[in-house]
Image (tube, coloured by chain):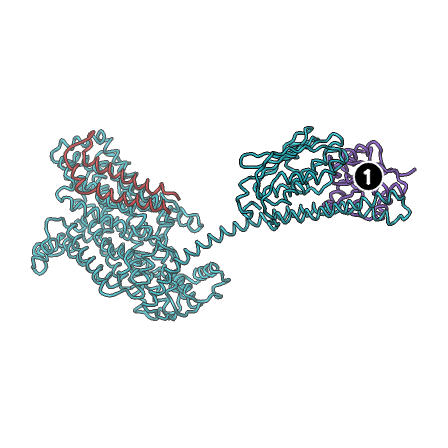
Amino acid sequence: MLDLSVIIAVSLVYLGLLFAVAWWGDQRADRGRSLIANPSTYALSMAVYCTTWTFYGSVGRAAVSGIGFLPVYLGPTLVMALGWFLLLKMIRIVKANRITSIADFISSRYGKSHRLGGLVTIIAVVGVIPYIALQLKAVSSSISLLLGYPDIVMPGRSATTSVAADISFYVALILAAFTIVFGTRHLDATERHEGMVAAIALESCVKLVSFTAVGVFVTYGMYNGFGDIFQRALDDPSLRQLLGAVPSGQGYTSWFSLLFLSAMALLFLPRQFQIAVVENVNEEHLRRAAWLFPLYLLLINLFVLPIALGGLLHFAGQGVDADTFVLTLPMALRHEGLVLLVFIGGLSAGTGMVIVETIALSTMVCNDLVMPLLLRSHKTLLDDSRDLSRLLLTIRRGAIALILLLGYLYFRLAGEAYALVAIGLISFSAVAQFAPALIGGMYWRGGTRGGAMAGLSAGFLVWAYTLLLPSFAKSGWLPADFLTQGLFGIDLLRPQQLFGLTGVDEISHCLFWSFFANIGAYVGVSLLRPPMVAEATQATVFVDALKDTGQRGAALWRGRARVGDLRDLVGRFLGPGRAQTAFAAFAKRHGAGSADEMEADARLVQFAESLLAGAIGSASARVMVASVAKEEPLSIEEVMNILDEASQLRSYSRELERKSRQLQAATTELQEANERLKELDRVKDDIMSSVTHELRTPLTSIRAFSELLHDDPKMHLADRQRFLGLVVSETERLTRLINQTLDLAKIESGRADWNGCELDLTEVIDRSVAATSQLFREKEAQVIVDLPENSPLILADRDRLIQVMLNLLSNAVKFLTPGSGEVRVRLRVLGEALEVSVADNGPGIRPEDQQLIFEKFRQVGDTMTAKPSGTGLGLPISRRIVEHFGGRLWVESAVGEGATFRFTLPLTSARQPLEAGPA
Amino acid sequence: MHRRILAGDRLAAAFLVGCVLFNYPLLSLFDRHAAIAGIPLIYGYVFFAWAMVIALIAWAIERHVR
Amino acid sequence: MSKKILIADDEQNIVISIEFLLRREGFDVQVAGDGEEALAKVRGEKPDLVLLDVMMPKMNGFDVCQAVRADPDLSDTRILMLTAKGRDTEVSKGLGLGADGYMTKPFSTKELLAEVRKLLGM
């Protein structure tokens, strides 16, 4: 059933599905509804880390070294804990500078150096192409195994290998097509491939599902769970050692080296950098990826050891390669559906890695290798006004095809050689060489271009000498005595026992010597001279990436350029339409109607350069911009000054922020004050309206009487006298009103004159009662005064207190019933205060009116006809006077039982300066 | 701001804890032929420690207020 | 038959002066010292014209005016509002509530008489 046509059909259907998902993802991206704007998608796409080396290879490693396969996944877990620092910073830098690859990153950091970018590209290509070959080999092996079905025939021993190899050639071709379609759709300034990322995330799901399916099948289908498998293994003396001693045979050094290498690989493998940094759409996604991706790794490794043990138990003595157990176990049990699922899983693992790795490498090859060479050899390219965007796309597509072809060739050439089997870790070791220059560059300002060149070169050479060449020798492509006797027969130069270092495995050996050389050269050479202008500039941009998002780079450029030139230049690489759109958007962002209105200042030049950087790499972009802009070189002193200014600016801006917060608070206060003023104004308005009302009323009578008298000279004398009397009394009322209004205004504004002297309150009361005796007589009312023998002296204004007393007394008289009225005036000494009360037996005051009477112009009428004469200001003024001397004035009353007005004056006020009293 | 720093410290702690758990000498304590509930000691230990580190990362990073 | 006029104001002296003025001109004058009394007298005496002060105890002039206008029996009663508050809003409020005229204190006695005669159709 599993014949060639089925396999081809299944493969094509699966790849078609990938095409569909990628196409859909791109469509959604174009419409602005990103499919991958989701933290889980981001985390899943990071699982491109798990290639066929994981899918098939982990079981193989576990069959030899027990849990020795695990450090390769524990390392990434640890690095994800640091991802929030490291990856976040990398993402910020990449976004701010429109960096498109790891080569671009390093080249940009050290002053946009072409040579450095080229070197990184070469290291990546040399290190990674065999890894691509490994994927093709794994896919090819799985196909040839399937073709042997139902027999289990190890690849390499069957005649079908060539067919499978041919199939893998076609697989490589299809992958090239896929990569070209979704990897180079257009030259995006940010170099994002959303459709591709969506497809990769899907592949990660497929990998996990199919591997877990096999795991469950073996663990619970063939055996009775974990315990059963482990028990059988423990009972088997040959398997027993797999379940103990950690990295069997190699010790903890190897374990640690693998942990470290895999951590580096997760950051610096071109495909990981592409997915985790370049393709990141939202740095918040890091949050979920930080734990979801490690969790993915844990899950996909859960069943590795059970499958390995199950395979070893099942195929004991049959010579079945442990690398194939994932596929051969379901095959042995004739579980065809599962076999196909596993095949698809392996295909996912292989294609996912190949697609992303190829896109990443092709970008590097194009931007950091081919473009710089083209720019150098064809200087006319610069002057030519041809549209270069087609050329760029062609270069990238060519690079993709070439990389896949190289991968295929390496696979055919190497065949079953050792070089292919060990290539996973050899690749890891190669890309780990980026670590010193890259991490150092992100945190150390002192690193220079020379240092980075020296470090990378040294590390790469040591890597090649201690790991790559020996792997060639082991494959028989180099004489074996190179390994055993050293270069030129010099013993100390034996590549895997360099300078006599023995007792460690080859990976740890390479790691130690290559990092020794790499870090040593990087730091050593960097310290030889201070950073130059371009290096210092970029160092600041990189090292301070998390500090601010300001356009620091822009400040570090001085020169002249024309807007038209810049736009044409960008247009030649991105296409005129896209350039037009980008410039218009930039102009709009900066408040200009169109780009032509803008001055070609440092900001615009930098914008153009970053647009170009997205398409051709930062180093080439710099060269291209320099060709149309007349740059005036800055000295290192100037740069340092600008950088200093920038940091000063930062502190200024923090200061400004603080100030603006203060200003905002002040504004709020002012607004509140304004509200209060408005309220006061409204109150004042009301008072004015009351005052005019109070003025108009007597004026009305005065005018009416005057006109009556004036118009009628023959009026009766009695009427005449009566009317004139009324006019006089209304005039008095007016005068009183004006005086009291002014008085109150003075007291309220604090401008009243207060005369302080020691006085005896009993004397004040006596005088007041005497002054009002006429009023009481008119009403035939009685005044009863109750004063103590001795009352303490207080410090107050005598006239003011008399004013208060007169007020209260005349108020009381006003409401008395003629004939039976009675007012009691009493003074008491209450500890710390004196209390005066004026009680009448009038009609009393309703509770709801007891507060009103202390408001200005509030008079409370109580009879059917009469309105109390008076201004309505007496009580408010009295209350303020009493309060001025630290006392209180209030009323106690019930309807029908009279009213008692009381006020207190503190004795302590005698010792206080008068100005301190509440005004 | 404060919580951000705290989350960062927690992540750094998770990293360091992982480094210690996944390396010599702690690893060697479990490096013997023994089994708990049928699961070999070293296998159980590594996966358990791994899960703990992941949980620690998730706690540190997701708990941080957005 | 002379026209009957009700003066409703709580200011004694104003009442005295207007009462004297209108009596001299031959009107039949009634007096009320607060809002409630005014409304009662409007209903009881059915005056032809009410001179209505706004600021009165117990019931203000606006409420009296509104109550009079709400009563169909009193539809012939003319109302002239008198107020010491000369704001435009007060004027429009009074007219809005159905007053026939409006005078601001202090007023000239001639103008008051002219307005009274105009409202009484004389």
> What is the chain identity of the residue bearing mark 1?
C
How many marks are shown on the rendered structure?
Answer: 1
- Residue A292 in which image quadrant: top left
Position of the N terminus of chain A, as image quadrant, is: top left
> Residue B2's x, y, as percent?
36, 46
Q: Residue at x 7, y 59 (%)?
A: A490
Q: Can residue A54 be seen in this view?
A: no
- Residue A541 in which image quadrant: bottom left
Q: Residue furthest right?
A: C1
- Residue A439 in which image quadrant: bottom left
> Residue A340's x, y, as percent?
28, 39
Amino acid of disc 1: Ile
Chain B color in figure: red
Chain A color in figure: cyan
> Residue C42's x, y, as percent?
82, 34
Question: Viewer-proximal residue, A61 or A146?
Answer: A61
Chain C color in figure: purple
Q: Is residue A487 visible?
A: yes
